[in-house]
Image (cartoon, rainbow, N blue to C red):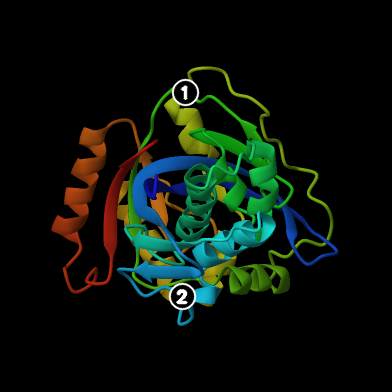
């Protein structure tokens, strides 16, 4: 085998609570990850030496700054590989959007190279490598639709919701820097002064979970901080909530926003409603997705 192709799916966070800031500068959190059916396409090809990254969308000015490059570099050095790899990325997940596109690409590189080069890495070892690349990367190593993440998000417990969810997702057309959002959170009136004792997150869920209970659970501690970094986001959230009559939340550090629907028909109908009632000029930079739990 000289090449392999993989799908690198996106994610949303159904809830995200920040518990405390750690001494290392990161934050302990509780979150519920969900893998969804929007995906980048990754093709890995063996080459004589080195690492080459090609993408159909601009990601980084230098290849070495691309997280997919970093994933390959770690494995080549760890396993002392004599040959190299070419990474071709077809981007379908918006960049720096809170949907885990880069993290998923990196995880796919780890998974794909493990198969392509027959490295024999087991999942726990791959998860440790994944954490070196980013807090969200270990989730994409796991073969699960839903997982509760603790620590910085790397301590994962698979959960069974018992159903597939449909989402209307709006990427408003501007990027969000995760570091900047967390800095705003720490400095703002929503900053943590002590460990959060009021957080109650179920370690498991009754199956199937009631749809109303899932909607009621939607929450993101970073949403207020994200709004302070970009006031336009607040207007979009309020407009969408009013128009759709739904709870609209940020995924991760944003700026992507989403709401839940019971089935595809409802989600498509909501998407059409956005196109009818929001002028094209107001949403010219938006990307609107209908996506299902993967």
Q: Is residue 51 above or below residue 288?
A: below
Report, in whole angstroms, how far the alpha carbon at label 2 lies from the one at label 1: 34 Å
Q: Which residue is mark 2?
A: 231
User: Quick one: label 2, few (<14), some, or many (20+) residues within 10 Å?
Assistant: few
Q: Residue at x 52, y 17 (%)?
A: 207
| Residue 20 location, quadrant | bottom right
Residue toward you, 109 or 286: 109
Say what secondary structure mark 2 lies in: helix
Is residue 246 visible in the rendered structure shown here?
A: no
Which residue reaches farthest top? Answer: 207
Q: Residue at x 52, y 45 (%)?
A: 111
Say what secondary structure mark 1 lies in: loop
On the image, the x and y values in percent for residue 230 come to: 48, 75
On the image, the x and y values in percent for residue 175 come to: 44, 72
What label does residue 210 carry, if any? 1
- Circles 2 and 1, Cβ within 8 Å, touching? The answer is no
Residue toward you, 150 or 116: 116
On the image, the x and y values in percent for residue 236 come to: 36, 65
Q: Earlier in the sequence, mark 2 or mark 1?
A: 1
Which residue reaches farthest bottom? Answer: 61
User: Quick one: label 1, few (<14), some, or many (20+) residues within 10 Å?
Assistant: few
Answer with left or right where residue 194 lies relative to residue 47: right
Location of the N terminus (image quadrant): top left
Answer with left or right where residue 139 lies relative to residue 276: right
Residue toward you, 44 or 156: 44
């Amino acid at each position: 085998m000289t090449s392999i192709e993989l799908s690198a799916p996106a994610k949303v966070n159904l809830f995200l609570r920040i518990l405390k800031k750690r001494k290392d500068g990161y934050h302990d959190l509780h979150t519920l990850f969900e893998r969804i059916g929007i995906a980048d396409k990754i093709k890995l090809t063996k080459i004589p030496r080195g690492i080459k990254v090609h993408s159909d969308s601009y990601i980084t000015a230098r290849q070495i700054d691309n997280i997919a490059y970093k994933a390959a570099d770690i494995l080549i050095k760890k396993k002392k590989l004599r040959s190299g790899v070419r990474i071709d990325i077809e981007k379908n997940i918006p960049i720096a959007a809170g949907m885990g596109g880069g993290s998923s690409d990196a995880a796919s590189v780890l998974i794909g190279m493990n198969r392509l080069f027959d490295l024999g890495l087991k999942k726990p070892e791959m998860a440790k490598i994944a954490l070196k690349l980013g807090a969200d990367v270990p989730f994409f190593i796991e073969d699960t639709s839903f997982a509760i993440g603790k620590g910085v998000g790397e301590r994962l417990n698979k959960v069974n919701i018992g159903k597939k969810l449909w989402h209307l997702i709006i990427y408003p057309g501007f990027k969000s820097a995760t570091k900047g959002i967390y800095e705003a959170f720490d400095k703002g009136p929503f900053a943590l002064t002590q460990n959060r004792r009021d957080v109650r997150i179920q370690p498991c869920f009754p199956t199937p979970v009631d749809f109303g209970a899932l909607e009621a659970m939607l929450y993101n501690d970073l949403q207020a901080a994200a709004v302070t970094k970009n006031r336009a986001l607040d207007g979009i959230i309020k407009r969408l909530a009013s128009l759709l009559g739904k709870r609209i939340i940020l995924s991760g550090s944003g700026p992507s926003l989403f709401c839940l629907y019971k089935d595809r028909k409802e989600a498509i109908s909501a998407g059409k409603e956005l196109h009818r009632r929001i002028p094209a000029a107001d949403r010219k930079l938006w990307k609107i997705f209908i996506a299902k739990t993967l």
